[in-house]
Amino acid sequence: AAVIAGTVKGLGIKCARISFTDASYLEIIAPDPKGPGPIGELIKSKGIVELTPFHFAIRTKRAEELKDEVSQFSYTPDHITMFGAKPDGTPRKWEMLYLYGHKIGGTCPFFINWANSDHPCATLPVVGKLKKLTIRAPDDDPVHKLLEHVGVEGITVETGDKPKLEVKFSSPEGTVK
């Protein structure tokens, strides 16, 4: 079962997470009826009512540096630094880099640096193994060059007219796709 992670203020979403054996995780998001925001409104406007792959993130310590590099791929960067507190009150910080200026939705990743924050899957029970993450984008889309530039591993990249994001993982109930 997914573990409730709470709300993300300002984005209009609530979330739950499941963790996999390779220190990756799946975050399940839904609109937060108590706190509107752009992501929650986007989910509602698209009429998404069942589990649907929406977006993916790549963990990197280079999120800040990448904001200056992504323009070569025709992206507009949005670098966000978040602050919070650990359970003991110690300050924590993490940063995200979102990319705009494309037409392939969540098939284009965002980047996250957990900095001095615990990675979300560090305290979650492990559900199974992430077997496959597949993205598909048109041959001429810059996401192919972006992924090559950042040197990601473990992502299957396909070429095709219609963008696609697909996740496949094992669980106690069998393989989920």
Image (spheres, rainbow, N blue to C red):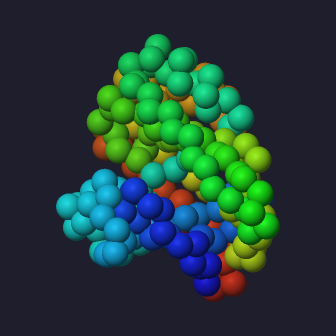
Residue 50 seen in render: yes
Between 157 and 99, the one nearer to me in the picture: 99
How many numbered marks have been drawn onto this rendered protein structure? 0
Percent from the top left, x then y, of residue 11?
39, 57
Q: Residue furthest front?
A: 89
Percent from the top left, x then y, of residue 10?
40, 56
* Residue drawn at the location 61% of the way across and 28% of the way down: 64
* Residue drawn at the location 29% of the way across and 36% of the way down: 103
Image: 25 above or below 111: below
Res. 147 image quadrant: top right
Q: Is residue 33 left or right of residue 3?
A: left
Percent from the top left, x then y, of residue 63?
61, 32
Q: Residue furthest top?
A: 72
Res. 167 image quadrant: bottom right
Q: Is residue 55 left or right of residue 84?
A: left
Percent from the top left, x then y, of residue 50?
35, 75
Residue 145 seen in render: no
Image: 12 above or below 139: below
| Quadrant into which the N terminus falls | bottom right
